[in-house]
Amino acid sequence: MTIAGIGAISGYGWGREALWQGLLSGKSAATVQPGYGAGRDENAWVALVPEGGDPAVSTSRYGRAMHDSAREAIEDALARGWRPGRTVGLVHAIVLGDVVNWREFYLRDHGHRRSRDYMRLLPSTPISVLLQEYGFHGPAINVSAACSSANVGLITARDWLERGRADDVICVATDMSATPDMVEHFVQLGAAVTDVEPLEACRPFQQGSRGFSMGEASVAFVLSREAEMPYCAVRGGAMTNDAYHVVSVDPSHEHIFDCAQLAMADAGVEPDEVAYFNAHGTGTRQCDLAERDLLTHLYGDRPHIYAVKPLAGHCQGAAAGIEVAAAALGYDRGVVPAAPIVAPSHPGLLDGPTPFEGGITAKLSLGMGGNNSMVVLGPA
């Protein structure tokens, strides 16, 4: 299965090129947002998606972002020679859905709206609107696995293609939930950091890392068995669950190891063939410990390491979407868009944009509730 097209909406702006240029700049997408800090009377660094998109699609920024990212991926794939098969499916990876719209529904409208406006709240609506525009009639679902959701969406799409349930699949991951309410809780959990510029706070695999900055994104992929000019191949993937805690990672890391080994086997790849490790990279202590353990004991500390969250922010359910898009664009353009190193670091960590040497990429994602996933990418 290959990635035939990519669309992206991020804190850097609307469009795939805005994301790519933002990552290459080595500068964070986050800006200072008034009223997002402690007690809502302080400023905070957050990588919000700016206003934009097609107002004819939706009055909701969430709906517009989902739709525009998918449109861009489809148009990109068509321009690169893809032709839709008879059955095109859609997987939409989400966690909280349209948070802003639900908040307004209860607090502003007190639960009363016209039926057509109420329908925009439902997770099925953005899917339906997109399928209607293109006349796609394949299977369509929402999937949710916390911050691992985008990886899970790609794994689901690959399963559909492998089993013949669809000829092609559009996979979209959308998370526009970085509201002051949500940011506050992640700060209280000790995971998010808002009081300093992200590259100062979020330093995965580096000394002095405190956690991540919150971000938003909608990222879409066209996945196909047949494409003339694909970005890269999705070789395999796997999912496991720690069954340990709603927030904390199982300190044994046993099930993260299982996930990686299952993904390698599914992809037909040996650990020593992995050239790049595209990290979950939240910059939190427990995540750093888990990923360092995996790198040492399964991969022998051989792969090059890079993380995107210091730049794009932690985009929650869409996080792996941003990170897979960065890797896929890197295969196509010959550059790994790594974040700059700002402190003493793991010897395998890449320092800023680096020439891509080719080979296999292992993309790990870890989500709350013990949701582990890995997607294995390779040359098309």
Image (tube, grey):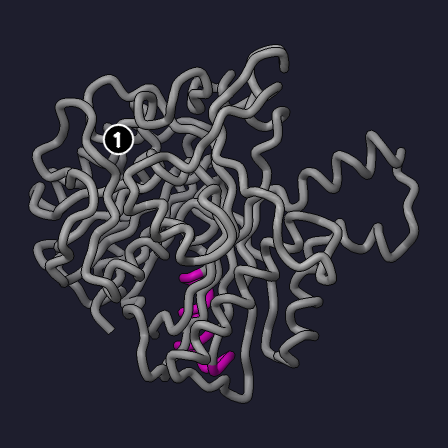
Q: Is residue 29 visible?
A: yes
Q: Is residue 246 visible?
A: no
Q: From what the image shows, is residue 297 above or below residue 213?
A: below
Q: Position of residue 113 (x, y in %)?
A: 90, 46
Q: Position of residue 188 (x, y in %)?
A: 51, 16
Count of all numbered marks drawn on residues in the image: 1
- Indicate the amino acid at tag 1: Pro
Is residue 320 shown in magenta? no
Principal SS element in the magenta part? helix
Q: From what the image shows, is residue 283 above or below residue 258?
A: above
90 left or right of 124? left
Q: Position of residue 332 (x, y in %)?
A: 26, 66
Q: From what the image shows, is residue 236 above or below residue 12?
A: below
249 left or right of 75? left
Q: Residue at x 48, y 61 (%)?
A: 220
Q: Residue at x 66, y 48 (%)?
A: 61
Q: Residue at x 44, y 65 (%)?
A: 221
Toward the viewer: 10 or 122?
10
- Per the rendered image, the range of residues in magenta is 154-167
- Examine the image and state in which quarter residue 376 appears: bottom left
State the quadrant of the C terminus. bottom left
185 left or right of 158? right
247 left or right of 200? right
Question: Most extreme residue toward the bottom, as rendered?
Answer: 86
Crowd tier of the residue under label 1, counting other residues whose Cα lies within 10 Å: few below 14, some 14–19, many 20 or above: many
Q: From what the image shows, is residue 270 above or below residue 209?
A: below
Q: Residue at x 55, y 74 (%)?
A: 89
Pointer 1 residue:
204
State the quadrant of the N terminus. bottom left
Tag 1, which secondary structure? loop
Toward the viewer: 282 or 65?
65
